[in-house]
Amino acid sequence: MKKTLIILGVASTFSAAAHAQSSVTLYGSLDAGLLYVNNWEGHSNWLEHSSTLSNTYFGLKGVEDLGGGTKAIFRLESGFDLTNGGFAGNGLFNRQAYVGLQNNQYGTLTLGRQYDSVVDYLSPLALAGQAGGVNVAAHPLNNDNIGAQYSVANSVKYESANHSGFHFGALYGFSNQAGGFANGRAWSVGAGYSNGPLTVAAAYDQSNINPNAAVANPSPAVAVLQDANLQRTFGVGANYAFGPGTVGLLWTHTILNGATFAPQDGVPALNAHFDNIELNGTYGLTPALALVGEYTYTFGKTSGAGTQSSSPRWHSVTLGTDYSLSKRTDLYFAGVYQHASGDLYNDGQGFVVDNSTSIANALPPSSTPNQVGVTAGIRHRF
């Protein structure tokens, strides 16, 4: 009888251990609220809006322990609109879809649809990537993808293990297109270092097609500068934590070569560059109540054959507060103001495209140089 109990106990132990070595987790974030915009296609407007503060998505992630410090991992993640239940972007798993191997010593190698190094290393230092994500704080036109509005398909990605606070990574996206190996490919590299309260990072991303062209319902400014034959983005940033607060500084530079001018036939392709300088901060007034804010100055230069140079500018300010009802549910109130100036395009012969507001490439542009958006809502993470 005792031997039987011992055998059953050992078998049960091994069964539990085997079960613990493999797991699949359902996770996600739901964000919905009311939004006021003072100028929406020429009129002020109230509406219900999804993902104003942070992205709405669900996903599955899994891990299987293969032994020797190596694990098989996967992630399937889909963004959607909570107001109507429709999927956002292309396909079902439009945010991330990958499988790979992870080793405690050698790092992680994955294949599939994944975010680039700018998103991995610089976005967490911007307000758009902090506090669970503050989407309205993404930079105008999402010109640098700090707002993580697109990911790279057909990509292989490597992320190193953490070496005393230092880590690095790289991504290569195969074109999977006819017309040449380089047609539509992308690659990026990044590195970061954390030591106590200080975190610093740098990243570089290059693509042979401007990913903004794939953004659903782009603003007119994004529609103007699309399908660039070469896009390059690089930047550096740092965050410093003090008590319940964090302050951050970020600079990114984006270059577009050969961007088409979609609304007009016969207009020469444009070359453009944009610089974004962001100062941000978060502060916990109490364990449940937090304040967030940022100011971003974006200045650009556009030019093309037979044109004169144009100098679009944007000043963006975001302020918000977040109150946690629990570890997973919170209420938020946030406002964003943006001022645009300069021309987006000027051929020097009387044909001018005025610059317009582009609040995180999420709201329709204002018909005036200024735009204000105010939102209040609820977010639940699981």
Image: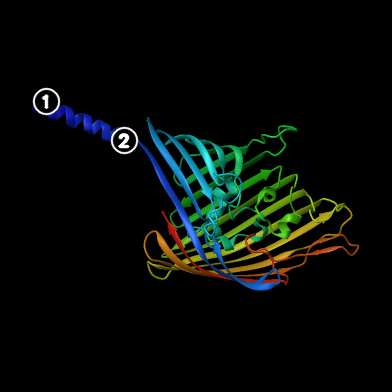
User: The N terminus lies in which quarter of the figure?
Assistant: top left
Q: Is residue 153 left or right of residue 368?
A: left
Q: Which mark is residue 347?
A: none
Of all residues, the one furthest to the left in this rendering is 1
Name the residue that disc number 1 marks.
3
Residue at (63%, 67%) from the top-left corner? 316
Residue name at image x 62 percent, y 53 percent? 145
- At 9% from the left edge and 28% from the top edge, which residue is drawn? 2
What residue sits right under mark 2 in the picture? 19
Classify 10 Å Cα crowding around label 2: few (below 14), some (14-19), many (20 and above): few
Residue placed at 42% from the left, 65% from the top?
244
Dots 1 and 2: beta carbons under 8 Å?
no
In percent of width and height, residue 204 lies at 63, 46
**Quarter-wise, where is residue 298 in the image?**
bottom right
Residue 320 place in picture, x, y as percent: 51, 69
Amino acid beneath label 1: Lys
Q: Nearer the viewer, residue 149 or 1?
A: 1
Dot 2: element = helix
Q: Residues within 10 Å of mark 1 (few under 14, many from 20)?
A: few
Residue, far front = 84
Name which residue type carries label 2: His
In the rendered image, the vertical position of residue 193 relative to residue 173, given as above or below: below
Q: CA distance from mark 1 to mark 2?
A: 24 Å
Label 1: which secondary element: helix
**How many numbered marks appear?**
2
